[in-house]
Structures are given as structure tokens and as C-alpha cells.
Amino acid sequence: MMNFKKNYLHRVVLASLVGGAALLSSGAALANDSDELEKLRALVQELDQKIRVLDRKAELSEEKAEADRKAAPVIKAGSSGFSVESADKKNSIKLRGLLQADSRNYFSDDNPDINNEYTLRRVRPRIQGTFFNIFDFDINTDFAPSAAVVQDAFINARIQPWFQVQAGKFKVPVSLERIQSGGDLRFVERSYVSDSIAPNRDVGLQIHGNVLNDKLNYAVGVFDGQFDGQSNGTNRDNVANADGKEIAVRVFATPFKGEDSVLEGLGFGLAATRANGSDQAVGDSYRTPGQRTIFAYNGATLTDGDKTRFSPQAYYYNGPFGLITEYIKSDTDVVRGANSDKISNDAWQIAASWVLTGENNSFRGITPKRDFDLNAGTWGAWELAVRYHQLNVDDKVFEGPAATRYASATSTTEKASSWGLGVNWYLNKNLKVQTTYEQTSFDSGVAGVQDLEDEKVLFTRLQVAF
């Protein structure tokens, strides 16, 4: 449209000049004045040249404006976070966050050290980004509950979908539930599998990718090595094998992904770790859903060789229904004084959920069809979840007198069995309210020692995530 206007104006001006020149030329001919005619012709040519110059400048200005527009960064703000992206979409930086405000209320417990409380479970500002459409980075910090911790800090090179290289601090590829984001959990606290036995985050190098049309995911990593349930760089950290490294391997298949089949949402896999270390105090410690420590090793119990884990796992999602189940076993060679043993501890869980309002269930969370809006009379999405999980500690750690046991003197629980019921309200994609009730029974592993009183705890959570 701009070029049409310029060309039209050009034609009008030239037509006027040519018409005027023709009239003047006629008058000049009658007057037989050739000098005046030449002057008019020169004037027309000069004006025509100036108009062409102006046209070209306008074209250049328009081209520059279009180039500037194409090169300008794209700023986005929405329910998925805040981001700045280059015009060619090869570079981006995104600001994200997760805030969880919890309450814990315990019932029928006479232990004076257990108090009802309000707590900030996660306070995580996060920066993610991509450079040159290949190199992704993630910096995820946490300011809860008391001290600031770097949860994740890694670079991932997406050389090919089937071959990616990741280095830094990130989740060790073992537990299925641990891999699930903390903002997508269906219960306020994770199960014994991921919270007590599987490693959390560690520093290392990992090769991973998707093959067979994204139907098979693999990961192979080398890490510093962590004790059960622990992370590198937290208040509970301790390198499990200071004189070696830990190898982690995971393979997970979704064979019916993308197909029109009732099995499309089925996924299953295996994960394992292996490390070797010695002469360190065993740092494994296990907690209840209410975050009470119920088992730890005696400080004189040391690592004495291999530490291995093995974990089969699966999930299934179909419409509003979701199911996740996994098992994990941890074997640790230990020594105390003249005694040495291989200690085998394990845990398992099965959890199911149903979206009452009909939205599709998924491993990555739920997005309401209709956001909560009192004026519109819509109430978001509602979900009901049930879970049973169990922790088993090797009875060998409780053998003998307290002064020589592998377990600490205050640790007497051999088995913890928990069932939970959760109700989750998704007001919109960013705001969720959770309520979870967990009840745990305990079996003592020490003869003559009474079982701990059942733990009964009601959790509530208000979560904002973007």
C-alpha cells in the first residue's frame, strides 16, 4: 500500500510537470524562445530525479523498519511464565517460580517434639533458557525451609533428540516419582521410594535422549554419589563414595505413545545405580510422610564396598484416571568393628488418582477445562487420590545389643506402612490447593521394644506455580 501511494504520487507530479512543460513548450515555440524550452526540460528532469531519490529513501526506511521489527526480541508473559525470546527463536530466557505454603496437623501423638506447624515447603525462583537453539540451561534455587540451596544448576546440549549431554547438578535418573516435578505431585509429600531410598539430586555428567519416535527414553550418568534420599549440597548431603563415582542408568518405554489405543498412556521402565566406597559413616536416613526421621545408622557404622540400587517402575494414564507404581531396593556393604554385612533396605508404592471434573490425567499435571471464576460459575478441576506405600529396613541392623548395632540407638523401626488420601483443587493452571491425610503404622525391629504410635497427619497446601 505504501509503494502504491508513492508511485501514484510520482505519476501525478510527473504528469503535472510534463503537462506544464508541454504548454510552456507550445508558448515558447510560438515565441521562438529555445533557451526557455531547454530550461523547462532541465527543470522537469531535476524534479524527476529528486522524486526518485525521495522514493528510494522511503523504500530504504521501510526496509529498515521491517528488518528492525524482525530482529526485535519477543517478550511474553502468561500462565507459563515470563520470557524474552530472540526474533529467530534460537535464544531465550524464561523466569519461572514455585511457591508452596503448607500446614501440618498431627493427631493422637503424645510426643512433645512433634508440633503442628505452618511451613514454607518450597520457595523456588527459577531461570531457564536456551542459546543457539541447542544449549539449554536451568538454575533452580530454593529458599525454604530455612537456608538457600541451589537445587538445580546444569547445561544440556541437545545435539540430537536421541543424543543429549547434560552436566551440572540435577535429579539422578532413578525414581519415577522423583523425576516428577514438585509442583505436579498428587500428595503433599513423596512416597518412601523417592523420599527415603532413591537419590535426589547430584553433581555429574549424563548422556540421555529419546529414540524410536520418542517411545523409548534412556539416561546414563556418572555422579559424585549420594546416600539414600539425599542431595548434593543440602543439609542432609554426604558423598556416599568419596573415593569413587556412582553410575546411574535408566530406561523408560512408552510403546503406545501417539497411538489411538487404550494403552497410549502406559509407560514402564527400569533404573539402577552402582557405587563403590569405604570408610565413611553411612549417611542413609529414612523419614515418615510427616517428615519425622525414624531410621538412621550408628555413627560408627561405615561403608565397606559396593552400594547398589534397583528400581522397576510404571505409570498408566487414561482419560481422568492415573496410576503410578514403583519399587526400589538399596544394598549397602557396611562394617562396624569386626562385623561386616550387606544391608538390604527397600520400599514400594502404588498410587491412583481420578479427576472428578473429567479433565485428562497425566504425569505432568492437570489443566482445568474451565478456570475457577465465581462470576461465571466455574470451579476449576477437582481430583481424588489414594496411595499405599511401605518402607522395609533389613532386620540385621537391629541385631545384638544397642552398643554394637548398625542402627542408631534411637532407631528401632523395621517397617513403616502408610496409606494416604488426597483431594486436590486446581483453580487454574497456576494455582492449586491440596489436602492430604496420611496414616502410618510402625513395626519394631528390636525385641522387647514397643512399636511407635501410629502417625496421623493432615497436610494442606496452597501452591502457586508458573
Image (cartoon, rainbow, N blue to C red):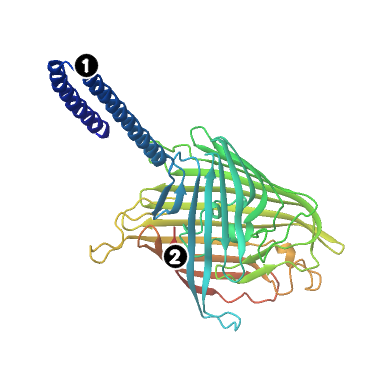
- 263 or 431, which is in the foreground? 431
Against 305, is 436 above or below? below
Image point 25% across, 22% down: which residue?
39
| Amino acid on which the number 2 mark rests in the picture | Gln
- 190 or 120, which is in the foreground? 120
| Quadrant in which the N terminus appears | top left
Q: Are the residues at dot 1 and dot 2 in contact (C-beta closer than 8 Å)? A: no
| Quadrant in which the C terminus appears | bottom left
Against 298, is 164 above or below? above
Against 119, is 36 above or below? above
Q: Please provide percent x and percent y for residue 79.
A: 39, 55
Q: Please provide percent x and percent y for residue 12.
A: 18, 28
Residue 263 is at least partly visible in this image: no
| Amino acid on which the number 1 mark rests in the picture | Ser
Structural distance between the alpha carbons of marks 1 and 2: 91 Å
Image point 31% across, 28% down: which residue?
52
Outermost right residue? 338
Q: Quadrant of residue 291?
A: bottom right
Element type where label 2 sits in the image: strand
Q: Residues within 10 Å of mark 1 (few under 14, many from 20)?
A: few
Q: Residues within 10 Å of mark 2 (few under 14, many from 20)?
A: some
Residue 250 is at least partly visible in this image: yes
In the displayed structure, does residue 353 sit left or right of residue 157? Answer: left
- 314 or 172, which is in the foreground? 172
In the displayed structure, does residue 341 sit left or right of residue 86? Answer: right
Q: Circle 2 is placed at which residue position?
A: 463
Q: Circle 1 is placed at which residue position?
A: 34
Q: Please provide percent x and percent y for residue 140.
A: 56, 57
Image point 52% across, 65% down: which residue?
123
